[in-house]
Amino acid sequence: MTRLHTLISRLFAPFRGERLEQDLESELRTHLEMLVDENVRRGISAAEAHYAALRSFGGVEQVKESYRDQRGLPMIETLAQDVRYALRQLRRSPGFAAMAILTLALGLGANIAIFSVVHAVLLRSLPYKDPARLAKVWETYRQFPKVWASVPNFWDWQEQNHAFEAIGAYRIATGFTLTGQGEPQRTQGTFVSANLFGLLGVKASLGRTFVPAEDKRGAEPIVILSHALWQQVFGSNPSMVGRAITLNDKSYTVVGVMPPGIRFPDWADLWMPLGQMGTDELTSRVYHPLEVVARLKAGVTLAEAQAQMSTIAGRLDEEYPKTNAGWGVTLVPLRKELLGSAQEALLILLGATGLVLLIACANVANLLLARASARGKEMALRAVLGAGRGRLMRQLLTESALLSSLGGTLGLLLAFWGRDALVRIGPAIVPHLEGAAISGPVLAFSAVISILTGLVFGLVPAFQSSRLDLNGALKEGARTSPSHRHNRLRSCFVVVQVALALILVVGAGLLIKSFVRLLGVDPGFSPRNVLTARIDLSPSRYPSPDQFYEHVSDRLRALPGVEAVGLINYFPLGPESANKTRFGLERSSPSTQGTLPVAELRLINLDYFRAMGIPLVKGRNFRSWGEEKQQVIIINTTMAHRIFPNEDPVGRRINLGAEGPQPSWFSIVGVVGDVRDFGLASQPQLDIYLDGPDSGMCMVVRTDSDPLSLAPSLRRVVHDLDREVPVTQVITGEQIVSHSLASRRFSMVLLGLFAGLALMLAAIGIYGVISYAVTQRTHEIGIRMALGAERGEVLKLVVGQGLALAFVGVAIGLAGAFALSRLLAGLLYAVKPTDPATFAVVSLVLTAVALLASYIPARRATKVDPMVALRYE
């Protein structure tokens, strides 16, 4: 206990210094008085007694120092002393401190904000049991590397595999209209296998999940709610389990509610068992509606499971040649599948912020080197008074650590704002982005990176500043000009800044050029003055939905400003849909030999092409709704060229029932222009247009003015016919095009911001070095001008120094950009990672920035008065 008490006392001693000093003074005074009294009792006079007491006691100051060492921890006390001294130094130079702290805050804040997203999206474990053993299982066919699975194939996989503990599945997104809870709401749901939640290791927070019997046809209609839906629509009612809700005019019994944060897939609001799916989907291998998830057995690798699943696919190919010929299987880790391209984009952005921080470090290191020149005499005096080189370096590193701590604190505040901005603009692009927070791990990261930053920018200046020429520094009137070593280091730091800035600006330039080229891509339709809206009808209430859609279309056409009203089941530029079909031909062509070709199947009305501005290239349009009974179709130009090369496709027939028991022949009556089905960066697919309605359709209204002004009228028209029909996704065609570019815009804007920040810091670095050089060379410049040097020569001399640094930095940066720009290949469209034009333009821009940053101090140098300069010092 005594040792513990002593240790605690020593730890807290630095925080009780004033009181302890008073106690020490009192105790020493008491000891001296006792010695004086003892000497007086021996018969010595009072004056002699006092001096004798001092001689016997020893040096008072030495005793004090010895006591201080014993009562506290010298290292902590010295550190506290260094921190206090560093604070005084920063107060004496507020401009330097503000510049350094702000520079570091920008670099650190960007890193912390991006890391909060990386931690939430890439580093945080998925909320499932042992997620490393989870994988997505896709079917493959021809040029399609990832295709959804058919239900019978899924059952076969479950029975025949030995690599997985379990295989579960869910149907691709299904829309449900929820009624009976106020206004009708459109919700996203899915049908899942009974074992899916158990496979994921997820339990219901209320009620239960599904049991195997509920996967079979004819089971009672039941549903599980997401926590968000239960909370927002049903008010977190704890007695929801056992109650009935109405979905698509059908009653379903709620059997469970999921825990908060559990939504698999992440768009699902509710889940139903597979047995509630349609009969055709459950029994036919023609339909491929399922996404499949599997859990690997312990000790089984993904490669081993892949080999076994490929064997099973080959077996099914032989057993069911009509539907499974040419089909394969591929496995992908679940985390990789969920993240998609977001992982690559986030890692690139994190690397970009790292480069920005390095540039900030180089900038602050330059400031410290410049400041060290002015503190040369101070460092020399401290060395003469006994401070060793290690002691001086420790003091200087303490100042650097203090700067980085203050910069990190301000950067953390900026990171809160940056994180909020990222969450606002990126949820639809980056999965799980809403979970980004300045949490414990992020705070730990900010602390560590702040400390490392202090070492990175402080170590070299501290090392160089502690190498002293005492004789030169202490001479009366000695100039405080920096050594050539300092000048070389400052120049090196500027070169590093320019090189790193060029790498970032090249990356931003490539993304900007790619984005501009995407904006120039023709989507195949005219989005201007187009309003779209999703209308979903209940199949039980509207078994033949064509009449409802016709009534809505007729009323909309009667509104002022409406030019055309079209309908399509899935609007272009959206995600991959399940509306694919394989088809056969009357006679085989070289392009279709072997496996059957695949096309996108689009259901439209006859006015759709006019509403969208899609040109009719050949043949005719549909004549009326319902003409599909005559089994006619329209195809796009890509399909005409690829399937019917060198011949007229109009009049030819294709078999849309090639996989069924009976053929279903359709005659081609027209060819229309290509449309980018899955984004501007995607290539046109084979498109087949059928004339006929589905229960859910996207309405397309072309107007002669602002399309959003028509939105209230569109809602009113639909609700006048049936208030139970939801109208959702009301958006303009231009907004759809913009949304399709959101992920690329996200990466471009952020990398562009970081590149702009890097360019600014590099310009400040060049300006600082040249400006300081002008200040230090004022005497030299005055002599030159006194000897007849023209202002133009002085300007050329100073600007040349800045441009020389810039040229070296650009050369190094070009080499780095050439190597690193390949990492952007997956984010570029129609632009090579080594695009010469981008590299050339960026090099010129950086050179121009360096020229401007050098010109300002150079112009100041030309205004030096020779007489004043000669009296310099």
Image (cartoon, grey):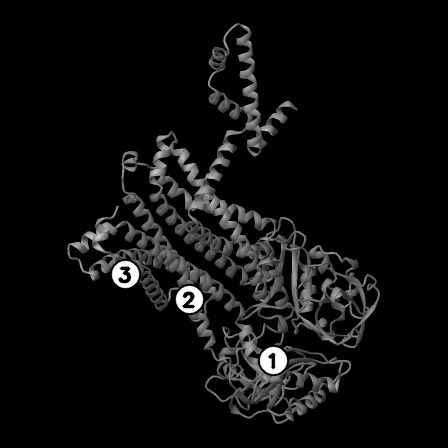
Question: Could you tell me residue 761's position as x and y percent?
Answer: 40, 57
Instruction: Give the alpha-carbon distance from disc 1 to disc 3, as whole Å.
Output: 69 Å
With 872 as the anchor, is 15 left or right in this view? Answer: right
The amino acid type, in three-letter code, at marker 1 is: Leu
Q: Earlier in the sequence, mark 1 or mark 3?
A: 1
Question: Could you tell me residue 749's position as x and y percent?
Answer: 48, 66
Disc 1 vs disc 2: which is toward the camera? 2
Instruction: Please tell me whether residue 283 is drawn above or below residue 588 in the rendered image.
Output: above
Disc 3 vs disc 2: which is toward the camera? 3
Q: Which of 480 and 679 is in front in this view?
A: 480
Residue placed under numbered mark 3 in the picture: 859
> Does the rendering let one see residue 698?
yes
Disc on res. 510: 2
In the picture, which quadrant includes the C terminus?
top left
In the picture, which quadrant includes the N terminus?
top right
Instruction: Give the alpha-carbon distance from disc 3 to disc 2, as whole Å.
Output: 35 Å
Say which element carries label 2.
Answer: helix
Disc on res. 601: 1
